Amino acid sequence: MTFDELGLSPETLQAIKDLGFESPTPIQEKVIPILLEAGNDVVGLAQTGTGKTAAFGLPIVERVSAEKKYPQALILCPTRELCLQIAEDIRDFLKYKKNLKVLPVYGGASIDNQIRELKRGVQIIVATPGRMLDIIHRGATAVDKIDILVLDEADEMLNMGFKDELDGILQDSPATKQTLLFSATMPKEVATIAKNYMTDPTEITVGKRNAGAENVRHVFYTVHSKDRYLALKRILDYNPNIYGIVFCRTREETKLVADHLIQDGYNADALHGDLSQSQRDYVMSRYRTRVLQILVATDVAARGIDVDDVTHVINYNLPDDPEVYTHRSGRTGRAGKSGIAIIIASMKEKNRIRDIERFINKKIELEKVPDGYNICEKQLFHLIDRMEKVEIDEEQINPYMEAVMRKLEWLDKEDLIKHFVSLEFNRFLNYYRDAADINSDDRDRDSRKRDREDRPARGEGDRAPRDRDRDRSASRQPEKGYARFFINVGKKDGIRPAEILKLVNEATDDRDIRIGVIDLMGTYSFFEATESSAEKILGSFNDIDYNGREVHVELAGEGNHLEGEEKGEYRPKRERWSEGGGRRDGGFRGGNDYGGDRRSRGGDRGGDRRSHGGDWGRDRRR
């Protein structure tokens, strides 16, 4: 099928041609005809990168009228970055249509300027839910005349706690509108939105439900927790052309991993919630233009990233929710390209990998962390390929060639090649000489000895692993400036991170409280919030219930009797894991987990770093 067959106007077809679109994607083939005819509501289940923006954007520019100076189409999306991206795409579609305006509306920009633009007349609004509801409440614009409402990445909006805002906007919109809901996954919250606000929607699924893109390959490596960073470096070295995203659980870990990659010569930077908007824009600008090749990010910070050419997504830590893994892996394999989603896992996480496999309906393949020989071979041929393909500026180089030839005339062809290769390649040979095997599923005597050294101290060995993990979760040190709380609802209650966030917001009547890491357990959970809000949180959970269960919150690790999974009560012991300087399962312990191969490198990271970073640093700073 071609775009000509979909019934689009000549102006829109010309705009598509200018953009280089050749044929519609599966989601576009199915959605565009329904929207052009103002037909049924639509629930579209598809990953990012499948062409959803054009699927709803092209019919919208066909249906809105320049003669009407009020909003006729509203597109809601989770983040500022995605809001701006969608607005820019729609402007491209409007290239040959006159007097039609699209306005992005989002937090972090002047609301007064946005209101002024709306009053001048706008046909299409692209907005984040919070800012849109604020503008509606100020009476700056109404949505009671819109013909089309699009909820893009609905699962992400709900995960970010926007349910109340979505309810408020949807309730103000006309019942006669056509509603389109796009989502990568279909959790019950998204299904509830569809049930409450849509009329007999047509469900369109591209691929399998909850599955990632079909052209993404999923692999995992198993290593000891303290070898995560070492495994990450080997993965990066084995893929010299990588253009990827590394996902970490916390802001602090994101900063730490990015800092060490930068120090080790990799062209990387961090994206996390502590960055200002201008800092975030700067990092993303460098990443989009490939000045950076590795972006280290938290899940929240990465929402709205819309880059088509990402080759690898690396899960430095597994997310708690399989749906989050689906969103992470959806950052690669976009726009018909292939991609790889990688998990760096510890042995105890294998069961969680099986859960993800069942959720995405795909096999996640176990692979060996590349050894030194394979990495050196890959880097060598990468170097040779670069040499073969380098452009030669004869005019610029010819004046120097006579002197160069005299300097090298004592070398024959074979020796010349050896000298050239060694000059560029010795750093990898030296770095990976005698490098150890760090795969934890193929353990030798030294690995088993290391395991024994990592076991709990005497007196803890008879505790079940689940009990030790539970105590460890209770006493995990929160990020600086945050306190860690226990809440007596967990996975068995059907709780989700977004619902814990909502419980805190409703109990405290304060949506400005910053929530950090959330760890979901069986019948209880832990969450982090700013220390300044601790007193307010502890004093607010009175007469709060969740699905008929009374909810209470306490500071984690204070020795209080808390509700456990088996015996009815659980007493956290902060002191059990407090020594040693950090999380045992996070890949860092007092800074000593970096450099697992340092003995084979000569021990001094600073000396080796200058040579090891040559190919990355020299190549990637261009």
Image (spheres, rainbow, N blue to C red):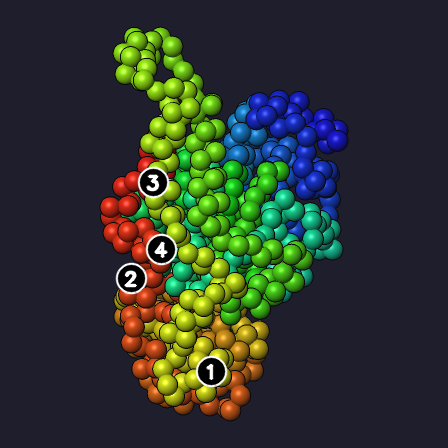
Residue 587 percent location from the top left of the image: 39, 63
For marks 4 and 2 on the same chain, the one whose residue lies earlier in the sequence: 2
Say which residue label 2 marks: 591
For marks 2 and 3 on the same chain, the one whose residue lies earlier in the sequence: 3
Measured Cα–Cα span from mark 4 to mark 2: 14 Å
Residue type pointed to by label 4: Asp
Say which residue label 4 marks: 597
Residue 559 percent location from the top left of the image: 35, 87
Q: Which image quarter: residue 283?
A: top left
Q: Mark 1 vs mark 2: give the one in front.
A: 2
Residue 280 in the image: above or below residue 488 = above
Say which residue label 1 marks: 467
Secondary structure of the residue carrying tag 4 is: loop
For marks 3 and 1 on the same chain, the one whose residue lies earlier in the sequence: 3
Q: Mark 4 vs mark 1: give the one in front.
A: 4
Give the residue drawn at x 39%, y 29%.
418
Residue 119 appears in view: no
